[in-house]
Structure formats: C-alpha cells, structure tokens
Amino acid sequence: MKKSKMFWGVLFIALAVLLIVTQLGLVNIHMSIWTLLLTVFFGVSALSSLLHKRATGFLFSIAFLIIIYDEPLGLEAITPWTVLIAALLASIGCHILFPASKKHTHYAQDIQDKKTVKDGHVDIKESFGSCIRYIDSQNMEDITITNRAGMMKIYFDQADIKGQEINCYLYMSCAMLELYIPKTWKVKNCTDSVLSYIDMEMFDHNIVEHTMILKGKINLSEVKIIYV
C-alpha cells in the first residue's frame, strides 16, 4: 500500500473516532466537527502541495482556511470571493513566472506507482495519492482520467490515436495532472472548470497530426500540457 494512501486512511479513521467521541460528549472541542474536518483536510492539502511545489493546490488550500476562520481573523470583508479570486490570480502568476519544464520534475523519482497502459479505452483513477502512467496503446479510442486530491503524470509520447481526434475526459477535484503529449498533437480545451488553471505550451499549428479534446469537469485543480 502506498504511504500517502495509508496516511489518508488512518487520518479519516481517526477523524471518524473523533466525531463519535465528540458527539457522545466524551471530548469537549470548542469548534464544530465540520470546521475541524475541513481544517484538517485543507491543512494537509496545503502541506502536501507545498512539499510537491503545487502552487494552485497550496494557494487554494490557504484561501479556504482563511474563509473558514474569517471571523476570528477579522477578514469577513474579503471572503469568500475576494480571497478565491486572489488565489486564482496568484496561481496564474506563479505559472507564468515558473512555467512547466519538459524535463521530469525532481519528485517524480519518489513516485512508486508506475505502470504501462496498453488498452484502447484508457481509464485511469487516483485518489489522495500519486501515480505515473505510460500509455503504450497504438489504437486509442478514448481517455478517462479521474483524479481526486492526487498528483498524476501521464505520458502519451509512445501512444497513437485510432482516428484524427480523441476525447480525453477529465474529472478532477483539488488535484494536479501533467499530460506529456507528442509535439504533433493539438490540444483543445473544452472542459467545464471552476477555480482551476490549465497551462498549455505553445503549439506549432503547421504540424498537426491528431487532436486531443479535453472535456469533463475540473474543480480547484491544475492541468499542465507539456509537449515532448
């Protein structure tokens, strides 16, 4: 079992026990259980994002913590929308100043979950963890990626598409995704995104062989398109 999933599993079991003893009056905590749960969730998310240098995840986690504690902090005047918009703008600024590198990021070496996928219908899922997938299908028909509070790297440089276009369905919440795409593939963004950032490198429209159409729903997440 991956250490990250073990951590989240133990954390949620501990929170379940804390919820029961709090409701039974065995432990007196001067905050609602939902405030406690959200504090732990966004606190861990901020720490994880900081360790993995994920600007979007870190900024939005801090923004939600500010919203949760806006009254004791005296920040009611700027919550929630001002804080969320500020987090979004700061995230965009960070990506402009520190664009994605085509090389493997240093923390890729720490990811243990690495697999090769050869199916025509690519379906990849990740929750509260990290993984790397190498797509080796020479006849891809569609792609579905589900990522809940995880970090994923997916390489398509050894893959091929059955037709001229392929739909890539993204379902993401509080997550990070890096797609490594061949230089001859055009990427079209048709996703329904909320407070998310999609970073696409410049593309040479004179060498288009295939088109990948991004669809689905992206919430509080970050997607990087890197050409290789």
Image (cartoon, rainbow, N blue to C red):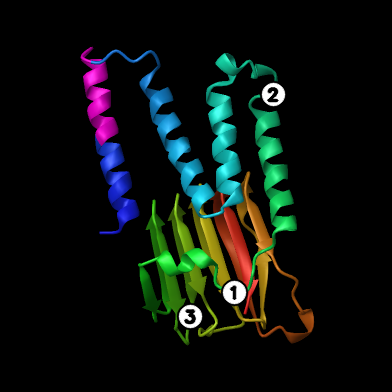
x 44%, y 83%: residue:
136
The residue tagged 3 is 140
Q: Where is residue 95 in the image (x, y as percent from the top left)?
A: 69, 56
Position of 90 relative to 71 (above/below): below
Position of 187 relative to 34 (above/below): below
Question: Circle 1 — which element?
Answer: loop
Q: Name the dominant secondary structure of the magenta segment.
A: helix
The residue tagged 2 is 78
User: How far is disc 1 from disc 3 in space, using C-alphas?
Assistant: 25 Å
The residue tagged 1 is 103
Q: Is residue 20 magenta?
A: yes
Q: In which quarter of the image is the C terminus?
A: bottom right
For the residue marked with disc 1, what is the amino acid?
Lys
x 38%, y 53%: residue:
127
In the image, 156: left or right of 208? left
Q: Judge whether residue 173 can be spotted in this image.
A: no
Q: Which of marks 2 and 3 is in front?
A: 2
Position of 21 relative to 13 (above/below): above
Q: Judge whether residue 170 can be spotted in this image.
A: yes
Magenta residues, start to end: 14-26
User: How far is disc 2 from disc 1 in space, using C-alphas?
Assistant: 39 Å
Q: Which of marks 1 and 3 is in front?
A: 1
For the residue marked with disc 3, what is the amino acid?
Met
Q: Is the C-beta separation of discs 2 and 3 under 8 Å?
A: no
Q: Where is residue 166 in the image (x, y as percent from the top left)?
A: 56, 74
Question: Nearer the N terminus, badge 2 or badge 1?
Answer: 2
For the residue marked with disc 2, what is the amino acid?
Ile
Q: Quadrant of the N terminus?
A: bottom left
Q: Is the C-beta separation of discs 1 and 3 under 8 Å?
A: no
Q: Does the magenta stretch include residue 134?
A: no
What is the crowding at mark 1: few (fewer than 14 residues within 10 Å), some, or many (at least 20)? few
